[in-house]
Amino acid sequence: MELNTFGSPVFIQGIAADLPAVNRVITSAVQMWPTSERLKRLALTALHYSNEDVQDFEFLLCYKAHACLGVAVWEPENVSLVSKDSSIALLHGLYVAQQHQHCGVGKLLLNEVHRRAENRDVAGIYVRAERFSASYFDHVGYHQLADNQGPGASDCAYPHRFMRDLAARHSNAA
């Protein structure tokens, strides 16, 4: 990977060879979670990605000065989120390495996911957030869905579901 001369963050689309960097960022991010060490350890088993995941997800890695600062993992082709009128992409994970949190890396990654989704005519981004990251998604312009709204709607819907309407972004910019 070649960085530009100004050292600005660079985004690359990850491949299987990038999975060790992806999983290092996830491990670093999870260590900041406000929960028990046991739960962090158990969560890492489920959150780390493997070679099989590369076929289902698109990995975006944010690099600066040869360091991977953060990772966004999304599923642009999730057929369960496609209707006759539009498609919704699933943001599967957003992780920023511990030492780079609160520096705007997550927002940069989300903006890149939004840009790529818009290029594919995706109408929105859907995320099932952890309890302690719900305020972050609210802060960056996602709106929380009620139990009967949007993807995954049901009487026992995941409690922290958020949506970002990309079509509304275009109408506000016009």
Image (tube, rainbow, N blue to C red):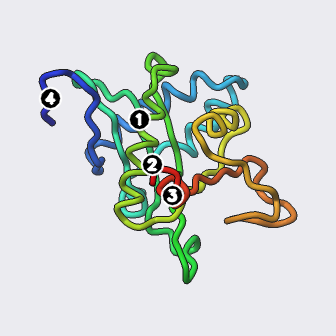
- Report the residue at 51% width, 61% height from top: 167
Q: Amino acid at mark 4?
A: Asn
| Mark 1 residue element | helix
Q: Is residue 121 left or right of residue 10?
A: right
| Mark 3 residue element | helix
**Residue under numbered circle 4:** 4
Q: Distance from label 4 to label 2 (Cα)?
A: 24 Å
Q: Earlier in the sequence, mark 4 or mark 1?
A: 4
- Report the residue at 41% width, 39% height from top: 109
Where is residue 129, by image quadrant?
A: top right
| For the residues bearing labels 2 and 1, Cβ distance under 8 angstroms | no
| Mark 4 residue element | loop
Q: Residues within 10 Å of mark 2 (few under 14, many from 20)?
A: many
**Residue under numbered circle 3:** 171
| For the residues bearing labels 4 and 2, Cβ distance under 8 angstroms | no
Q: Residue furthest right?
A: 155
| Mark 2 residue element | strand
**Residue under numbered circle 1:** 108
**Residue under numbered circle 2:** 73
Residue 47 placement (x, y as % from top left): 54, 43
Q: Residues within 10 Å of mark 4 (few under 14, many from 20)?
A: few
Q: Distance from label 1 to label 3 (Cα)?
A: 21 Å
Where is residue 138, by image quadrant?
A: top right
